[in-house]
């Protein structure tokens, strides 16, 4: 993928805009379901990695379990340089392979029979890419704690998990479960996803056996290494007791115990709006890292400095953004939208980021009321650029505009107004998480579900906000007490009704591309479109 510093991996501030996107064969190999990927269904990863902080190098093995769907023999496995695959073994026999950039093509000597369950062992090693600006430009982040001990972590959304371990690096296929074994020098602790099953040690090193008992997406897998201290708690949730585990640097233990009180508040609010936390079997963890944070499944990474806001700032400019720790709320919101419901293609990243940016508003709604929630999400409009569509290019690992955060959240807030029924709205949000539980999805599936459950044809609505960079503009003029109005800058068929205030007279109007008229009780002194709708208006 062409490097583009415009995009946020998970967070909300943009620095520049991608000029032009030119895609390469490597982008297609990374971003599409190639024939060498399509014929086998991933079932299980058994990953073991030894990390040597001194040399910043890795040595590892990934045993890939899969089911043969069609009898092919050429398999694609991704691993990015400078890491290298040393050997590929199936049934005790070395397999031949060739490298093409970030991709290895393996020729399997054993006949692959439809329906057969097979395993393939990949051995690899090297010095993985260092993160230039984690989590946006990911890789391994190497740092130190105040005592000079290593403090390291991975992050790889967009870039791909193949930056630190060999795998099928496309989002459409997730393993049903995964073992992650991390070996680090004593006295360090290594934290990955899921639950810690056991540890084993030698004189100099310690191996941490983690197990994820659910499907997991590639970029959700993570390794975090430090001389961590651990504390825990329990949340009484919709599915019973949920274990909470926290791994932080010893020097921050006091601050963490205070700040992480927001975790049960977050879970209470999100279970209300979205349904049960999707990974009870794997527990919920917050893990301190030397970068801002990321939505690693059941292992949310945290580097927001134990303060509210986004590094202490309010992204909405309303004051409400300082009522919560942005990284705890936003990244944990991704457990529902990213880890539970996962995009198949990163072009549909709005499914992760629009709902999760909107989850910040729903958190406020639950704890501080609807007025606070509305003020917050409306305040974040200052960050919208309308530079290009929210949906990106398919099959080339390409995201759309960073507007997927604030504009996507405002699109959903607008939709909530259209429904005028918060119980229905909540049932749609919960229904999405139930219907697409632990699935990878397309935008079409999400749009169709929301149209069906809302009883409204939302196709033009989604086309407008996701597939163009235009903001609907309501042109209006008064003829006596008659309001004349129409939409400009819209896609064909866009006819979203809006609520308008004319002095004390509140009415729904039904604009479209052609002029319409609605009588009011006299020409008002004050007229405005309800600001909860994300449109612009122009008085002619
Ligand atoms: Zn995010």
Image: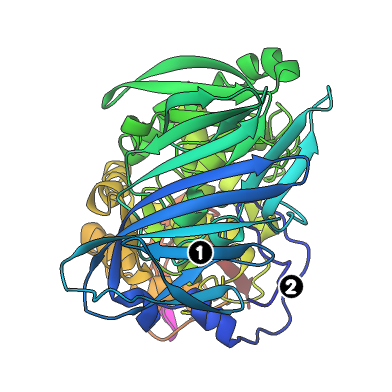
Residue density around tag 1, few if under 14, some if 14–19, many if 20 or more, within 10 Å:
some
- Residue indicated by mark 1: 87
Residue toward you, 196 or 505:
196
Is residue 515 among the parts visible in the rendering? yes
- Which residue is at a point 59% across and 68% down the rendered structure image? 536
Residue toward you, 246 or 353:
246
Q: How many marks?
A: 2
Residue 324 in picture, x, y percent from top left: 61, 30
Q: Secondary structure at mark 1?
A: strand
Residue toward you, 272 or 43:
43
- Which residue is at a point 31% across and 37% down the rendered structure image? 275
Q: Which mark is residue 176?
A: none
Where is 405 relative to 49, above or below?
below
Where is 122 relative to 483, above or below?
above
- Residue indicated by mark 2: 17
Q: Are marks 2 and 1 in contact (CB under 8 Å)?
A: no
Position of the C terminus by quadrant: bottom right
Marks 2 and 1, the one that precedes in the sequence: 2
CA distance for labels 2 and 1: 41 Å
Please say whether residue 179 is one of the residues in the magenta stretch.
no
Q: Judge: label 1 CB < 8 Å from ligand 1.
A: no
Residue 303 in picture, x, y percent from top left: 69, 35
Residue 532 in picture, x, y percent from top left: 51, 53
> Which stretch did the figure color magenta?
510-516
Is residue 320 among the parts visible in the rendering? no
Q: In the image, is 35 to the left or to the right of 457?
A: right
Q: In the image, is 313 to the left or to the right of 228?
A: right
- Which residue is at a point 35% across and 35% down the rendered structure image? 277
């Amino acid at each position: 993928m062409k490097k583009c510093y415009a995009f946020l991996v998970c967070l909300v501030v943009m620095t520049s805009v991608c000029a032009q996107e030119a895609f390469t064969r490597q982008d297609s190999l990374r971003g599409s379901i190639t024939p060498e990927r399509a014929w086998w269904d991933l079932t299980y990863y058994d990953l073991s990695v030894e990390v040597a902080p001194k040399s910043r190098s890795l040595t590892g093995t990934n045993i890939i379990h899969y089911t043969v769907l069609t009898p092919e023999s050429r398999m694609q496995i991704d691993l990015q340089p400078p890491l290298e695959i040393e050997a590929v073994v199936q049934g005790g026999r070395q397999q031949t392979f060739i490298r093409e950039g970030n991709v290895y093509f393996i020729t399997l000597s054993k006949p692959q029979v439809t329906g057969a369950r097979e395993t393939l062992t990949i051995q690899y090693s090297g010095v993985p890419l260092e993160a230039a600006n984690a989590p946006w430009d990911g890789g391994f982040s190497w740092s130190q704690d105040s005592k000079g001990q290593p403090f390291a972590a991975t992050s790889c959304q967009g870039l791909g998990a193949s930056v630190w371990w060999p795998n099928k690096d496309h989002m459409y296929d997730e393993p049903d479960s995964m073992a992650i074994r991390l070996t680090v020098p004593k006295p360090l602790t290594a934290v990955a996803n899921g639950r810690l099953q056991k540890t084993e040690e030698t004189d100099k090193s310690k191996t941490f056996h983690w197990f994820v008992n659910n499907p997991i997406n590639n970029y959700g897998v993570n390794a975090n290494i430090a001389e961590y201290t651990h504390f825990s708690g329990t949340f009484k949730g919709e599915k019973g007791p949920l274990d909470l585990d926290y791994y932080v640097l010893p020097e921050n233990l006091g601050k963490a115990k205070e700040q992480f009180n927001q975790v049960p508040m977050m879970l209470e609010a999100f279970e209300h709006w979205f349904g049960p936390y999707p990974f009870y079997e794997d527990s919920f963890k917050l893990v301190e890292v030397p970068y801002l944070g990321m939505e690693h499944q059941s292992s949310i990474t945290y580097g927001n400095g134990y303060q509210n806001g986004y590094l202490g700032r309010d992204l909405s400019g309303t004051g409400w953004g300082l009522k919560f720790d942005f990284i705890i709320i936003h990244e944990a919101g991704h457990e529902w939208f990213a880890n539970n419901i996962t995009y198949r293609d990163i072009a549909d990243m709005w499914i992760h980021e629009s709902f999760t940016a909107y989850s910040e508003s729903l958190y406020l709604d639950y704890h501080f009321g609807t007025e606070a929630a509305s003020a917050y999400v409306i305040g974040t409009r200052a960050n919208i650029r309308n530079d290009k569509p929210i949906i990106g290019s398919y099959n080339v690992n390409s995201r759309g505009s960073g507007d997927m955060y604030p504009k996507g959240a405002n699109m959903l807030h607008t939709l909530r107004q259209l429904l005028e029924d918060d119980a229905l709205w909540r049932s749609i949000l919960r229904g999405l998480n139930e219907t697409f539980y632990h699935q990878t999805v397309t935008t079409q599936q999400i749009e169709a579900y929301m149209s069906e459950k809302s009883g409204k044809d939302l196709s033009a609505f989604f086309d407008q906000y996701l597939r163009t960079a235009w903001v609907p503009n309501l042109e209006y003029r008064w003829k006596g007490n008659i309001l004349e109005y129409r939409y400009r800058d819209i896609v064909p068929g866009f006819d979203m009704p809006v609520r308008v205030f004319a002095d004390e007279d509140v009415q729904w109007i039904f604009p479209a591309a052609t002029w319409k008229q609605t009588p009011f009780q006299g020409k008002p002194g004050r007229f405005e479109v309800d600001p909860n709708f994300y449109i612009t208006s122009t008085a002619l």
